[in-house]
Amino acid sequence: MTVNGGQLVAQALTSAGTKYIFGLHGGHIDPIFQACHDAGIGIIDTRHEQAAGHMADAWGRLTGKPGVAVVTAGPGVTDVVTAVANAYLDCVPMVVIGGRHPLEDDEMMPLQELHGVPLMHSITKWTRLVRDTSRIGEYVVAALHQATSGRPGPVFLEIPADVLAASTEESSVKPLSAAEAPARPRPSVEAVESVLAMLSAAERPVIMAGRGVWFAGAADELREFAELTATPVLANGITRGAVPEDTPLGIGGFLGAGRALAFGAPPDFVLMLGARYGLFTGGRQSIVPPSARVIQVDVEAEELGRGGRADLRIAADCREALRALTDAARSRAWPDRGAWIQNANSAANAARMMFSGALDPSRTTIHPYRVAAEVAGMTAERGVLSVDGGDTFVWAELALEARRPGRYLGHGYLGCLGIGLPFALAAKLAHPDEPSVLLTGDGSIGLNFTEFDTAVRHNLPVTVVINNDQAWGMCKHEQTVRLGADRVIATELGAVRYDKAAEAFGAHAEYVERAEDMRPAIERAMAAGRPACVNVMTDPDAISPAQQAMAAAGVGNH
Ligand SMILES: Cc1ncc(C[n+]2csc(CCOP(=O)(O)OP(=O)(O)O)c2C)c(N)n1
């Protein structure tokens, strides 16, 4: 019996429980599509490889299992680069299988000759070229393992067309090794004791829980530890909601509540869990007060103390660390921190109250904060909220009151516009029983707009709400604030009817100009049972506070 390269890919993916591959066809990779189809693996074919990559990324974020993208040789590989970089900076498990011109045609200028391995090298954890058909399965299993072991990340596997199409005797193929659970480094007993000693001595402690907490599967452990020790929690990205933000210990996100806390009620002790110093901790205007004592826990030792101070550095898996901390914390008495918790909440609420005017029903123009607050509220109990855009993302970060972890997808360190629709589509696949809603800027939705077609073809009823300020808002506002209204250059877009364009792809469409029409329109869209686009015309002059701060500090946006 013989087996071809495509079948070996499908067998390895099946053995790892892969449910979907995301990709765009090309002759070089057809054996993979054929075999995955026969193996019952769902094939989500997109209109652009970037979208396939973003979908695989979002699948990894939401499920913790690597999303798999399959792209063709040459331009298929170059098209997916942005998505790989996005996953790389955010440490998301993802496997990209790239086609390649035949090995035997190297240096003969065949169609789509491009060497993906050197191209992908700087944006992946691990990248390999497969030269031997009989070893394809081994490489796929290794890729899946590399993507999830230690600190997760994207990996790239390049399979030349001749290696993939060739058949080999089944007897020459090594049986696949069973996937092993990733090793989880534990903290030492001394480290655990030091954390608890510093935490109990602190008067204003806070936990800053980064995305690493979610990726370690430690959301429940975080809540338990926070409750046991009465420690308020700030969370970032997909970890938001691990401690529900409508309860006293869930203060909010790094960007809004974190900033409010740093300047309104500065903590004296910060326990950073799976959180890195950088964009989300405020960069040079760090939300970690200089006077606070800091402990940082990260599965990747090289992250500890990178870009900021860590008085104690613990290289450990967040779930193992939280379990050890909780076990040891049970035998201690914890101080009543009622007053501090109240102060922390007041500081965070004061930041929210800054925008109460935006919610005033008598406003004639629709404020983007209102759109964000409405959409966040409608998905709070049930649903996945994806967010894309410049100022739109900032408004969402501020308006969100997350109540469950793993239900919020936003920008990471790449600040990559265009993630939105692919992320929302992957969210619908990962959580088919819950609504998937995207809040996006009008500029950002344009980058992957044709994925409305993917949504319709694959019957993925996502609701896209566009904050249409008729501009690349964050950039336009930066020009206005820093240079003056007469220096608005290349940042205006016009009143585009995205609803009509989406309708042409087969989506349900709504157009909103008046504030009172917005909620009913979004409700109709969510009830439509098919992909929907709600084009909300908003106030073009509403500038997010983050943009104002950046412009004032002379920091250009992304
Ligand atoms: C792929 C990509 N291109 C360009 C940028 C630079 N950029 C940052 S914010 C922004 C404006 C975004 O406009 P829009 O999506 O309409 O959202 P808004 O700021 O208006 O809410 C741009 C172009 C980027 N971050 N990513």
Image: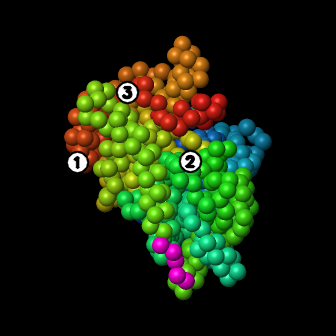
Residue pointed to by mark 2: 263
Task: Give the residue type at disc 3.
Answer: Asp
Disc nearest the viewer among 2 and 3:
2
**Marks 1 and 3, Cα distance to the nearest angstrom?**
27 Å
Please give the name of the residue rendered at 30% of the width and 41% of the height, measured from the top-left corner: 532
Q: Is residue 77 left or right of residue 60?
A: right
Where on the picture, by quarter, is residue 244? Answer: bottom left
- In the rendered view, tell whether residue 203 sits above or below residue 240: below
Disc nearest the viewer among 1 and 3:
3
Tell me, for residue 135, which label it has, or none: none
Q: Around disc 1, counting alpha carbons within 10 Å, would you say few (fewer than 14), some (14 to 19), or many (20 or more)?
A: some
Q: Nearer the viewer, residue 266 or 529?
A: 266
Q: Around disc 3, counting alpha carbons within 10 Å, would you say few (fewer than 14), some (14 to 19), or many (20 or more)?
A: some
- Which residues are drawn in magenta? 332-336
Task: Give the residue type at disc 1.
Answer: Ala
Please give the name of the residue rendered at 44% of the width and 56% of the height, measured from the top-left corner: 345
Seen as rendered, the residue at the extreme bottom is 331
**Marks 2 and 3, Cα distance to the nearest angstrom?**
29 Å
Q: Earlier in the sequence, mark 2 or mark 1?
A: 2
Determine whether the beta carbon of the residue marked 1 sits less than 8 angstroms from the nearest atom of ligand 1.
no
Main structural element of the magenta stretch: helix, strand or loop? loop
Measured as percent of width and height from the top left, residue 453 is found at 38, 40
Q: Are marks 2 and 3 in contact (CB under 8 Å)?
A: no
Please give the name of the residue rendered at 51% of the width and 68% of the height, measured from the top-left corner: 231
Disc nearest the viewer among 2 and 1:
2
Measured as percent of width and height from the top left, residue 167 is found at 61, 63
- In the rendered view, tell whether residue 30 sits above or below residue 503: below
Residue pointed to by mark 3: 539
Please give the name of the residue rendered at 43% of the width and 25% of the height, measured from the top-left corner: 541
Residue pointed to by mark 1: 527
Q: Earlier in the sequence, mark 2 or mark 3?
A: 2
